[in-house]
Structures are given as C-alpha cells and as structure tokens.
C-alpha cells in the first residue's frame, strides 16, 4: 500500500436501543434491595419495642384512696412520709397525724401546706411506734392510713 492511498473506513452498524415498555423497571430494580432492608429493620425495631412494652412490669398507679404512708429510721429519729401527689392529699385542706409511741400519744394538726410538704421527723421513745394519717379531701370524707414501725 502506498502512503498516499486514502484509508477507507467502513460504517459500523449500531442497532437502535430498545425502549422499555411502561410498567417495567429494569433500571430501577436495585432500589428495592435497600428499601426492603430498611423496612425489615423498622419492623424489627417496632417488634422489639412492642415486646419490651408488653413484658415490662406494670407501673405503680396512683391509688385515689392511697396515701403511701411509710416510715424509715434516720439516726435516732423516724422519718414519716406520704405521697404528697396523692389525690386525697392534694384535695385536703387539713389533716391529722396521730402518733402512738408506747404509752405516749401525740396528735399533730396539719394544714394544707404541711400536707403538701409530705413528711415529718419524729424522735421515738419506744421500740414500737404507730403512725396514723387522717386527711379530709372534702368536708364529709375522711381518709385514714396507718403504718407500724418496730425496731
């Protein structure tokens, strides 16, 4: 071949690209794999939360008639407390704490502010003391709860 001879190029045939019929997603098929994984994770998390809620111990519900009166010892004193959020305490305008310490008895008149405080400190004399809290949430109703403490 001579150096001057023109180079002949033959045309290359490229078939036309086929169009996808409507409703097919050949190019978007990869999208369902991560979406399926995300939905699986969400389902697992919701199932776990539901099982935790179903198996959780029941919460202590505030009893409308309970005062949750309790006594704990602190040094030489007794710490008497009650639930100041109890509906009966919140509604009461007054109350009485009766203390029976062996043969000694004492009555403490409590106003609404003292009831809202939720506690009293008492120095005991005998190894057994009984505390009785009476509150009046309305003029015609009286609610009483007692607790015994023994050394």
Image: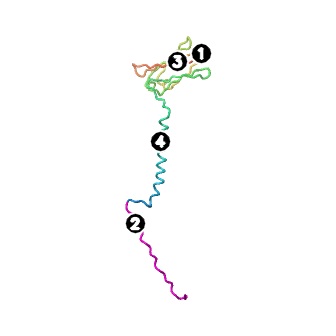
Q: Earlier in the sequence, mark 3 or mark 4?
A: 4
8 is within the stretch colored magenta:
yes
Q: Nearer the viewer, residue 50 or 150?
A: 50
Number of the front mark, 1 or 4: 4
Q: Crowding at label 2, few (<14), some or many (≥20) Cα neighbours within 10 Å?
A: few
State the quadrant of the C terminus: top right
Q: Earlier in the sequence, mark 1 or mark 4?
A: 4
Q: Earlier in the sequence, mark 2 or mark 3?
A: 2
C-beta proximity under 8 Å, tags 2 and 3: no
Residue annotated with mark 2: 19
Q: Is residue 122 left or right of residue 21?
A: right
Residue on which the image places disc 1 = 127
For this orientation, the residue located farthest to the right is 75
Disc 3 vs disc 4: which is toward the camera?
4
Real-space Cα distance between discs 4 and 2? 43 Å
Label 4 vs label 2, nearer the camera: 2
Query: Residue 2, located in which quarter of the rendered image?
Result: bottom right
For disc 4, the marked residue is 47
Badge 3 is on which residue?
131
Measured in 3D between alpha carbons, the distance from the residue under mark 3 to the one under mark 4, in whole angstroms, is 48 Å
**Helix, strand or loop under label 2:** loop
**Disc 1 vs disc 3: Cβ atoms closer than 8 Å?**
no
């Amino acid at each position: 071949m001579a150096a001057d001879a023109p180079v002949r190029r033959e045309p290359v045939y490229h078939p036309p690209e086929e169009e996808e019929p409507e409703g097919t997603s050949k190019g978007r098929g990869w999208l369902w794999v991560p979406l399926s994984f995300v939905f699986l994770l969400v389902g697992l998390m919701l199932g776990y939360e539901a099982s935790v809620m179903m198996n959780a111990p029941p919460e202590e519900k505030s009893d409308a008639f309970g005062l949750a009166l309790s006594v704990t010892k602190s040094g030489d004193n007794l710490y008497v407390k009650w639930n100041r959020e109890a509906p009966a305490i919140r509604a009461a305008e007054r109350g009485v704490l009766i203390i029976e310490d062996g043969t000694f008895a004492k009555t403490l008149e409590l106003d609404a502010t003292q009831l809202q405080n939720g506690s009293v400190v008492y120095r005991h004399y005998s190894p057994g003391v009984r505390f009785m809290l009476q509150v009046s949430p309305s003029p015609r109703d009286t609610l009483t709860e007692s607790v015994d403490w023994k050394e």
